[in-house]
Image: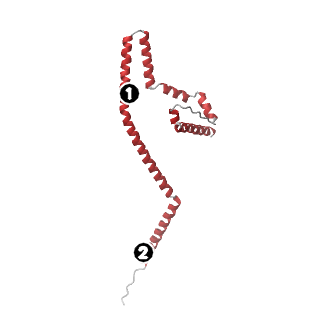
Amino acid sequence: MYAERKYLTFDRELLALSETLFHYRILIRQGQRLYTATDHKNLVIYINSGSKVETNRKLKNQETPANISARIFKETVETLLESNKKEQLKEFVFTTYDQLNLNLETINKNRSETTKLLEEMGKIYKRLDKIDQRINDVRYDLKSETNRLAITKLVNEHTRKINSLVRLHKKNKNNPPTININ
């Protein structure tokens, strides 16, 4: 139980920090520095401990395809410079530049499509929020106690009617109608 409490506190603190960074994302993009303070020692100890999660994240970030291709480019340029192969170096640099230029052109073409899709996603999220609000309003309006009372009233009325009809039927069955011949 004690460990579970620490874990929940840690998660809450990380959530608060991420929400703070998300709130001030415009200032961060502009290059302003933000200092955040925490009153939980667990978080500070966890960050400074160098745990496996942190090292795995660092390794994962370092081994992205862009970092790998940049490292390969740097190594090939260094080997070509050391061996004084200027012609091959020139060809290699120009081919990689052309490849990067093609990639940038495709990125620019896809940018307009992604902005349209993001706008559509925003509209869809707004619709979903409205639907969620309507559902919450309906849930609020449908109070369980009042529904139960209304349903029990209806059931009681119908059972009374059914019981009275059953009694009438039994009465008629036991007492056949008499015909006056006089």
- For the N terminus, the quadrant is top right
Q: Secondary structure at mark 1?
A: helix
| Residue visible at 37% across and 27% down in the picture | 103
Tag 2, which secondary structure? helix
Nearer to the camera, 113 or 70? 113
Give the residue at mark 2. 169
Q: Please state the horizontal and vertical placement of residue 69, each as a whole percent of the image.
A: 42, 22
Q: How many marks?
A: 2
- Three-letter code, disc 2: His
Instruction: Residue at 62%, 31% (x, y): give it.
Output: 45
Q: Residues within 10 Å of mark 2 (few under 14, many from 20)?
A: few
Residue 181, given in percent of the width and then of the height, sits at 36, 88
Distance from disc 1 to disc 2, alpha carbons, whole Å, reads 87 Å
Taking depth in this image into account, of 113 and 39 the one nearest to the observer is 113
The answer to whether 31 is drawn above or below residue 16 in the figure is above
Residue located 47% across and 66% down the image: 154
Lateral position of residue 102 relative to residue 21, left or right: left
Residue 1 higher or lower than 67, as above or below: below
Residue 61 in picture, x, y percent from top left: 49, 27
Q: Which residue is mark 1?
A: 104
Residue placed at 52% from the left, 33% from the top? 28
- Camera-near label (1 vs 2) is 1
Q: Disc 1 vs disc 2: Cβ atoms closer than 8 Å?
A: no
Tell me how the rendering is colored.
secondary structure
Residue type (three-letter) at the residue carrying disc 1: Leu
